[in-house]
Amino acid sequence: MISVLDTSAPTLSEVSKGRTEEQALYLGSAKANIGHGGASSGVSALIKVRLMIQKIMIVPHCRIKTKTNSKFLTDLGERNVNIALKPTVWERSTDPSRPRRVFVNNFSAAVGNSVLLIEDAPVQKAICALSLVT
């Protein structure tokens, strides 16, 4: 948690400005929603991300009811870091230079670590074909 936050949302004392409202960072877990996947945990996380992109929705973290782990950092709000506690709309930006990005990180029980960075594909311009029948 600390390494992800220090890389993606450093404390305000370490950067000149923090994340804007449009740059909110959401943390989630496939394990909380579907349990330990063992060898399939990375693929499970990838499927979850694919569905969130398709449905334009960040799904809520189902295990947190009132408060987070006391070992988590306490300055998440200052860093504009969130844990979705309800379904959150995740619209694609109208600015093509600002794609939605997802960082999938899978720590396995066998001490393996897989990392995947996914972002929106470029928007394709519609090609209009017109055929005239005489």
Image (tube, rainbow, N blue to C red):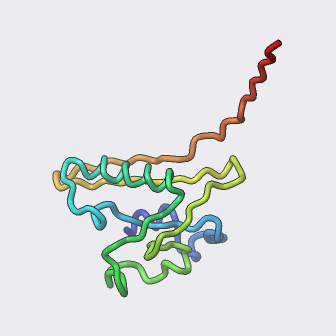
| Outermost top residue | 134
Quadrant containing the C terminus is top right
- Locate residue 130 relative to residue 118 in the image: left or right: right
Q: Name which residue lies at 75% across and 24% down.
A: 129
| Outermost front residue | 134
Q: Nearer the viewer, residue 101 or 107?
A: 101
| Outermost bottom residue | 66
- Locate residue 63 relative to residue 109 in the image: left or right: right
Residue 120 vertical placement versus 3 (above, below): above
Q: Name which residue lies at 17% across and 56% down.
A: 109
Q: Name which residue lies at 31% across and 75% down.
A: 63
- Locate residue 112 relative to residue 120 in the image: left or right: left
Whole-percent x, y for residue 1 in the image: 37, 68
Q: Nearer the viewer, residue 130 or 44?
A: 130
Q: Nearer the viewer, residue 32 or 105?
A: 32
Q: Nearer the viewer, residue 16 or 103?
A: 103
Whole-percent x, y for residue 133 in the image: 79, 15
Q: Name which residue lies at 31% across and 47% down.
A: 43
Whole-percent x, y for residue 68 in the image: 35, 81
